[in-house]
């Protein structure tokens, strides 16, 4: 059996998961600027990244804080692309 991650590592991972949860209102409020299918896409991305964060927390908790960074980048990319190519406006 592999060694369990240390307590500080688990704390760092928990903070990363908390940061992902803090991003939820930003993803939800994107519905003001996107059509329904765009909001559903964003929520699927957010949910998938939350699952990744939880799975990483069990094995590599020091990588979990990267998940919210990826989430913000994806959120910004989807909204920017939608605004540029699909005419999404608030």
Image (spheres, rainbow, N blue to C red):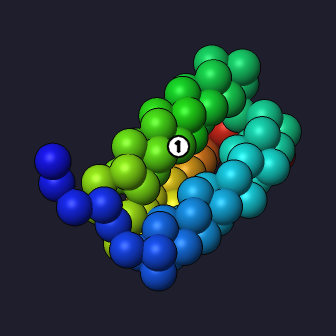
Q: Nearer the viewer, residue 37 or 16?
A: 16
Instruction: Name the residue that disc number 1 marks.
Output: 50
Q: Position of residue 46 (x, y in %)?
A: 56, 40
Against 47, is 64 above or below? Answer: below
Q: Count how many numbered circles sit on residues in the image.
A: 1
Give the quarter of the image for residue 62.
bottom left
Seen in the picture, residue 13 relative to 75 is either above or below; the reply is below
Above or below, 31 relative to 36: below
- Residue depicted at x 74% and y 59%: 22
Q: Does the rendering let one see residue 61?
A: yes
Helix, strand or loop for disc 1:
helix
Residue closest to the far top: 37
Residue 46 appears left or right of 26: left
Q: Nearer the viewer, residue 11 or 85?
A: 11
Q: Residue furthest bottom?
A: 8
Of 36 and 1, which appears nearest the observer?
1
At 72% from the left and 20% from the top, the residue drawn is: 36
Tell me, yes or no, if residue 84 can be seen here. no
* Residue 26 appears left or right of 46: right
Residue 86's place in the image compared with 1, above or below, is above
For image coordinates 54% across by 73% down, the residue present is 11
Q: Position of residue 85 (x, y in %)?
A: 48, 40
In the rendered image, the residue lying farthest to the left is: 1
Q: Residue at x 75, y 53 (%)?
A: 26
Res 14 quadrant in image = bottom right
Label 1 neighbour load within 10 Å: few <14, some 14-19, many 20+: many
């Amino acid at each position: 059996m592999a060694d369990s991650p240390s307590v500080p590592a688990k704390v760092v991972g928990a903070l990363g998961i908390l940061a992902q949860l803090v991003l939820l209102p930003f993803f939800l409020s994107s519905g003001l600027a996107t059509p329904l299918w765009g909001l559903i896409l964003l929520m699927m991305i957010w949910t998938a990244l939350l699952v990744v964060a939880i799975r990483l927390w069990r094995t590599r908790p020091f990588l979990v804080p990267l998940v919210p960074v990826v989430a913000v980048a994806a959120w910004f990319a989807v909204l920017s692309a939608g605004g540029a190519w699909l005419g999404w406006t608030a």
